[in-house]
Amino acid sequence: LKSLKQIPNSFLSTGGLTIYTNLDIYAQNALEESINNYYDENSPELAGIMINPNNGNIIALTGGKNYKQSQFNRAIDSKRSIGSTIKPFLYYSALENGFTPSTTFTSEKTTFTFSDGELYSPTNYGDKYPDKSISMVSAIAFSDNIFAVKTHLFLGENALVDIANKVGIKEKLEHD
């Protein structure tokens, strides 16, 4: 972005375009500084977005660590599986069905068998497992996939779809 000092005075005084944006330059700078201070060239790529919780406006966005190295914008152009973004809805359903933040399941390498006979062996990031009981709070903090699948199966395979529909998600979701 150019500062006003870099824009010719003739442009400012004769009209031109008026551009309205939700960009908060302080938030954008904070996001970029966080990336520069905590991630180095050997870190995995990333994307970041900051949203004003009062109105949903995007106030800062970055699509990667270094635009010169990669112009691909991971924040808006990446296609991802739903993955962990659905977990808050799963845990919301769990809370509505009697779980508490201290509810525990054992998190260890596990192969699950679904009602249709399909086998599923989820992995945690870095293939790391506590190999002990962990609370829902810990499962959320570490995005533990074993705890999530156990919660899903405990609640019933339709609970997640039902809660997603309840909160307004219109897409057709499969039970798994």
Image (cartoon, helix red, strand yellow):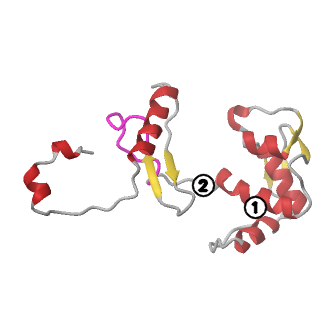
Camera sees residue 113: no
The residues bearing labels 1 and 2 have C-alpha atoms spaced at a distance of: 13 Å
Q: Secondary structure at mark 2?
A: loop
Which residue does the image show at 73% across and 73% down from the upper left? 166
Disc 2 target residue: 81
Q: Quadrant of the C terminus?
A: bottom right
Q: Amino acid at mark 1?
A: Asp
Mark 1 surroundings within 10 Å by alpha-carbon count, few (fewer than 14), some (14 through 19), many (20 or more): few
Q: Is residue 1 above or below residue 44?
A: below
Residue 159 sits in quarter: bottom right
Q: Amino acid at mark 2?
A: Ser
Q: Nearer the viewer, residue 27 or 37?
A: 27
Instruction: State whether the magenta stretch is mostly helix, strand or loop.
Output: loop
Q: Residue furthest front?
A: 13
Which residue does the image show at 44% across and 49% down from the upper left? 60
Q: Position of residue 125 (x, y in %)?
A: 69, 36
Q: Secondary structure at mark 1?
A: loop
Which residue does the image show at 67% across and 50% down from the upper left? 84
Q: Quadrant of the N terminus?
A: top left
Q: Residue furthest left?
A: 10
Disc 1 target residue: 176
The boundaries of the magenta stretch are 63-76
In the rendered view, does 19 fall on the left or right side of 172?
left
In the rendered view, does 14 fall on the left or right side of 145?
left
Q: Position of residue 69 (x, y in %)?
A: 35, 34
Q: Position of residue 4 (x, y in %)?
A: 21, 46
